[in-house]
């Protein structure tokens, strides 16, 4: 399987495509199939190495979507986008994952960390994410003795299980915002380099999340789409500290950042050789 890593930087920019009415940031904007496909094409055109298609919101408090409805939302979008580039399916349901893989997706973005067997059976990539609880309950007083150590152990167990089943493309996601307080999220980001020691690429999803806005002078005022500066800063931190994949709503700013860094690095290498 071809990795979606960007050839310039070694970083994968994963564009978010929510085919849902209720996602926390862009719910309803791309519920229409043709609008979703057009936005997916736009994400690829902006430089996304990978587009992540999801038909069920996993925001705090979100309700489960019936399987037939989730399939109706995502399958035509996956099929169309797979002709343009690498597509992942963001789902917690085994049959949705299977059908999306048959439609052209090559990676399962699994917030439940339960679909490793499906990935193994189909020769697909697998993103294992840590979450405490499910979307309906996960932000009801999440607690840890040591959030970094507990998430590290969980993700290492996922990696070992995937290795044993023969999954060759594994990504590990600490699950920022999934059953975590602001302090938990900051501890995970602040210790991100430790997660690289697990021996698999690390995926980070912080785009537009509310904890970012709460840390700035802007507070929680405004729409989630107004949090792009905070999202960019957090993603730059994550990349600098070892993230291999960043899952973002706005692709262009991250791609431009990576291009600038690569230009500076290229110039430095040339100067060091002369």
Image (tube, grey):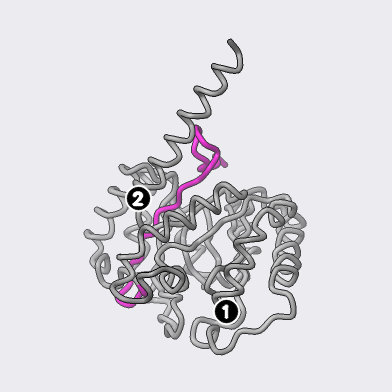
134 part of magenta stretch: no
Q: Is residue 79 left or right of residue 29?
A: right
Residue 51 point in image, percent of width and height: 41, 52
Q: Is residue 238 left or right of residue 197?
A: left
Is-magenta flag for residue 15? yes
* Label 2 close to label 1 by CB (< 8 Å): no
Q: Earlier in the sequence, mark 2 or mark 1?
A: 2
Residue 218 quadrant: bottom left
> For residue 127, which quarter of the picture?
bottom right
The C terminus lies in quadrant:
top right
Q: Which residue is mark 1?
A: 179
Q: Nearer the viewer, mark 2 or mark 1?
A: 1
- Distance from the alpha carbon under mark 2 to that under mark 1: 31 Å
Residue 90 placement, left or right of 123? left
Neighbourhood count class around disc 2 (C-alpha, 10 Å): few under 14, some 14–19, many 20 upward: many
Residue, x 47% and y 73% (percent of image)?
211
Q: Position of residue 225 (x, y in %)?
A: 31, 65
Residue 271 position in % (x across, y down): 55, 17
In the figure, is residue 43 to the left or right of 241? left
211 relative to 85, above or below: below
For label 2, the SS is helix
Front residue of 151 and 266: 266
Secondary structure under the numbered disc 1 in the rendered image: loop
Assign the magenta stretch its main secondary structure: loop
Image point 60% across, 62% down: which residue? 189
- Quadrant for the N terminus in the image: top right
- Give the residues drawn in magenta, as a range: 1-24
Instruction: Tell me the residue that label 2 is attached to.
Output: 81
The residue that appears at 51% across and 24% down in the rendered structure is 266
Q: Position of residue 97 (x, y in %)?
A: 50, 64
Q: Residue furthest front?
A: 217
Determine crowd level at label 1: few under 14, some 14-19, many 20+ residues with C-alpha closer than 10 A: many
């Amino acid at each position: 399987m071809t990795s979606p890593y960007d050839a310039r930087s070694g970083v994968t920019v994963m564009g978010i495509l929510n085919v849902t009415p209720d996602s926390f940031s862009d719910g309803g904007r791309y519920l229409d199939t043709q609008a979703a496909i057009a936005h997916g094409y736009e994400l690829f055109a902006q430089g996304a190495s990978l587009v992540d298609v999801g038909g069920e919101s996993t925001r705090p408090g979100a309700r489960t979507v019936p399987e037939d409805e989730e399939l109706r939302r995502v399958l035509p979008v996956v099929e169309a986008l797979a002709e343009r580039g690498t597509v992942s399916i963001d789902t917690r349901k085994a049959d949705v994952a299977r059908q999306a893989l048959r439609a052209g997706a090559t990676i399962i973005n699994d917030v439940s960390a339960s679909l490793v067997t499906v990935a193994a059976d189909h020769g697909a990539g697998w993103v294992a994410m840590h979450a405490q609880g499910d979307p309906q309950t996960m932000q009801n007083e999440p607690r840890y003795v040591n959030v970094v150590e507990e998430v590290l152990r969980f993700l290492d167990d996922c990696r070992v299980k995937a290795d044993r089943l023969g999954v060759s493309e594994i990504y590990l996601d600490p699950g920022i915002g999934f059953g975590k307080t602001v302090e938990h999220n900051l501890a995970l980001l602040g210790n991100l380099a430790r997660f690289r020691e697990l021996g698999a690429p690390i995926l980070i999803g912080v785009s537009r999340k509310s904890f970012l806005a709460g840390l700035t002078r802007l507070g929680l005022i405004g729409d989630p789409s107004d949090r792009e500066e905070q999202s960019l800063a957090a993603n730059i931190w994550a990349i600098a500290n070892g993230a291999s994949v960043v899952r973002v709503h706005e692709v262009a700013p991250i791609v431009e950042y990576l291009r600038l860094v690569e230009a500076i690095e290229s110039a430095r290498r040339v100067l060091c050789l002369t």
